[in-house]
Amino acid sequence: MSLAIFSSSLKSSAFKTARVATTITSRPSSAIWSQRFYSTENKDTKDTKEAAPAPAAQEGAAAAGEATEAEQKNTAHEEALAAKDKQLAEVKDRLLRTLADMENLRQRTAKEVANTKDYAIQKFAKDLLDTADILNMAIKNVPQDEISETSTNAHLKSLHTGVAMTRDELLKTFKRYGVESFDPMNEKFDPNLHQANFQVPMPGKEPGTVFDVQKIGFMIKGRVLRPAQVGVVQSTD
């Protein structure tokens, strides 16, 4: 009986000892696995933290990128505005030049129209100058005593009066259209207005003075239509 109890106690002690050994043996493996898992998790977390940029750095990089993009847009806008300003200045310059050319053309056209109007009868009037010369010559060649009040030659006096009136009326018609005559007798010779047909030295007269008028001169609107044909006193030096 005692032997049976002792044997049972021995078995019970052996079972407990084996159970404790099994527990001790299994614990290091679980602890090592747990330690390895925790170490791996910490390492991955550390690597992730090191690999991921800081939020502040990301925001700074984004802000810098936005600033650079904004500067590029501003530069592009400024260049576009500068190009438009240059184009506008060129268009304005061309417009001003065109307006100036048009104004010059308008003035030239107006002047040409006025000249055409003023000098339209120039050729016609010049053709009639010979008629005025003939009438003037006829009047000058009549002796003064033949047309005086004491003269009895009534027909010659009437003819002279009629020729003189015709000449005066022709000159008045010329004047209405801007054609005027001038007689340079005893005036200083002017090559712009006079045509010297001959020169004669005449003591007592100033050299260069007109002493004879063969044909009177005519002007049209301030322009010489025909110079007066004259004789000029020649210098005796």
Image: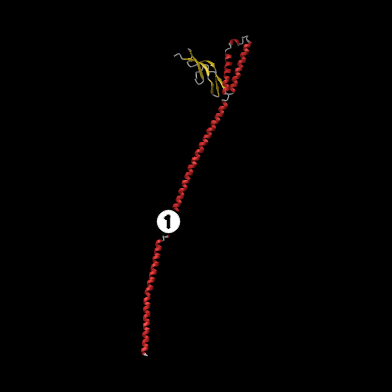
Q: Helix or strand or loop: what does disc 1 sit on?
A: helix
Q: Image point 62% across, 13% down: which residue?
A: 159
| Quadrant into which the N terminus falls | bottom left
Q: Image point 42% across, 56% down: which residue?
A: 61
**Between residues 219 and 129, which one lies in front from this camera angle?**
129
| Quadrant into which the C terminus falls | top left
User: Viewed as shown, does residue 112 lie left or right of 4?
Assistant: right
Q: Image point 36% across, 82% down: which residue?
A: 14
Numbered marks: total:
1
Residue 104 lies, with reference to residue 88, above or below; the image says: above
- Snapshot quadrant of residue 124: top right
**Between residues 237 and 71, which one lies in front from this camera angle?**
71
Q: Which residue is mark 1?
A: 61
**Callout 1 environment at 10 Å: few (<14), some (14 to 19), or many (20+)?**
few
Residue 66 lies, with reference to residue 8, above or below; the image says: above
Q: Image point 36% across, 89% down: which residue?
A: 3
**Between residues 224 and 94, which one lies in front from this camera angle?**
94
- Snapshot quadrant of residue 183: top right
* Badge 1 amino acid: Ala
- Residue 84 in the image: x percent, y percent? 49, 44
Q: How is the image coloured?
A: secondary structure
- Residue 23 in the image: x percent, y percent? 38, 77
- Snapshot quadrant of residue 131: top right
- Residue 160 in the image: x percent, y percent? 61, 13
